[in-house]
Amino acid sequence: MTTGNPATCLRTIAALAALAILWAVAPAAMANGRVALLIGNNAYPSAPLRNAVNDARDLGAALREMGFKTIVKENTSRAQMIAALQEFGKSLDGAEAALFFYAGHAMQFKERNYLIPIDAVMGSEDDVTFFSVEVSQVFDRMERARTRFNFVILDACRDNPFRDTFKVSATGLAQMGGPSGTLIAYATAPGATAADGFGRNGIYTGHILQNIKVPDMPVEVLFRKVREGVERDTKRLQTPWELSSIKGDFVFNATGRPAAAGTGQAGAGPSADIAAQLELQFWKSVQDSSNANDIQAYLEKYPNGVFATLARNRVDSMLGRGRSAPAAAPAASPAVVPPPATTATPAGSPPAAAAKEEPAPAVAAAKVTTAPPVVAAAPPSAAAAAPATPPAPKPKDDQPGREIAPGIREVNFADGSVYVGGMRGIQLHGKGQYTSKVFKYEGEFRDGLKHGTGKYEWENGDRYEGTFVDDRPSGTGKYQFANGDTYEGEVKAGVVAGRGTYVTKAGDRIEGSFVGGLANGTGIYRFASGDRYEGELAGGKPHGKGRYFAKGGDRIEAPFVNGLAHGKGVYYFSNNDRYEGDIREGALTGTGAYFHASGQKYEGEMVNGVPQGKGTFWFADGSRFEGVFESGLARARGALVKPDGSRSDAEIIDGAVRLSG
């Protein structure tokens, strides 16, 4: 054997040790390509989410630590989502594992699943295919790359974000299939909806983050533990779901640790330093769990680990078992107390077991003897002398936030939102106040949703005070809009609907039925000018049959279209004149008859309330003028017909009749 410079040998050993540590921590990253695309969308205009962006960021950071090349996109438009998928597809060239994660709104339509970008504008279910991105585009990239392991994780089974615009025929997401070797993970069962969560992360992604770094955990076990944790936290209201065609074994945090004895597999384990770090990481992943099985999992992997004693104590505490205190003898049980064989025991002396240990004085009358055992009741102090059972540990506060008063908690969310109020489990429940950057609500909650009476204020200054049902204004309430308008009356699912009164800033007042925030049905429209309309309304305007009362005394009875009289109607003037005939967009235009209070009458064509075209004008004496009128009675050419029937050519100039020739 040839010996070299000791310093050189030490440097070589150190370099090899460093290489061994690197290989132990991330062998998969060096051996095979791992690529992940993560998208988190929060900023939806009509239905923003709290923690989808955090979910994508945090899971992306965890995957980078485990050797993944990560592409993280936040608050993406449709064009940005398509570009991200194209980048993802190119990065998969030569990779062995591909992972796609999405947190945000998604919908199913005709049994296909669509991811909704933040710029989607939809008025009907049919618009989904045009404004969203179908999940099949993700599978297409994976299939073309022929990656061995594919993962599609969808924390996106939330409710329809366009529910105020249209209803969907199916809730949640539909089951779907991917290329061979794919695991598809849903935040909840197909067709169901999932909760957004109240901490930094969503409930589902939060449990993925808790488990994904556990060393050497098979992917199937990982998602089983995630499912168990989500069910536990949501009281089985949400059950994650997976569909898998994975072939072979896959772990996210592979350490290179040798298989358990007896499996026939071999491999070099990590160094002592790395092993200690792995054990610490495992313990951190379970130390706050309220499930004894999670703590027991640590003991099974590290029976003699650094935290083994603490873990056993935690398990015993959870299961109600004492470890340090021996069982105390029942007070009524007899005890055998043998006195010392050579000790004088005067009559009336206490039992030897209770006597103070000090030299006994000489007593002449005492007789030294070997006495048989004395059976005596245990002294009352015997039980008190036994070691006390340690007090039960204080119950773990596993609710979000902190308790600031009995029954009142304060929860701070990652987006800056703050909730102060009652809770039941992990859900907002009871009276409370929720303040975010875009709204403020003060009132009653039920199972995490605004339900009961409350006050809601939008970022733009709009306010609502009234009843809520399932997170939205419903029942009766009052809106005060930032533009100065107000509404008081019935509300359904967040929309002004039913009977109510709407008052504009200008002073117009609408009393009647409302649909979709606008007056629809029968009602009364009182204008600030003093005019009034009674009849049918649509789209917030007089539309249909109705009567219009002008402040000056005029009255119109006619059909109305978009706020104006339009069709056959009657116009009553305040001076007792009357018009019967065509009305077009509020003007007396078309064919009709105008009756003067003086007894005169015009019948024929009119434009803007003035005779224009062919017509006949009857005078009070019974004669009439038949002809073509220009600008009313200012100019007309025709014939004058007297009461006796005689006719003469004539014209009207400035209201005066002149005979021709």
Image: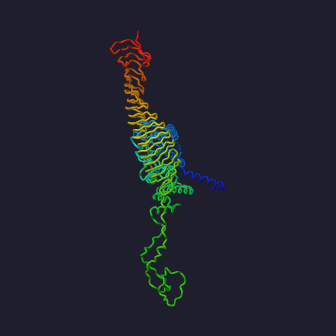
Q: In which quarter of the image is residue 130?
A: top left
Note whether 352 is above or below 22 in the view shown: below
Q: How is the image coloured?
A: rainbow
**Residue furthest to the left:** 644
| Number of dots carrying numbers | 0
Q: Quadrant of the N terminus?
A: bottom right
In the foreground, 605 or 444:
605
Which image quarter holds the C terminus? top left
* Viewer can see residue 101: no
Is residue 621 shown left or right of residue 103? left
Q: Nearer the viewer, residue 249 or 488?
A: 488
Give percent across and percent down for residue 526.
43, 35
* Residue 126, horizontal then vertical, whole percent: 41, 36
Front-most of residues 354 and 483: 483
Q: Nearer the viewer, residue 631 or 468?
A: 631
Q: Is residue 33 above or below residue 358?
A: above
Q: Most extreme residue toward the bottom, as rendered? A: 364
Q: Where is residue 193 in the image (x, y as percent from the top left)?
A: 42, 46
Residue 234 can be seen, yes or no: yes
What residue is rendered at 52% in x and 53% in y? 256
Residue 556 coordinates in the image, percent (x, y):
39, 29
What residue is at 46 percent from the left and 77 percent from the top?
379
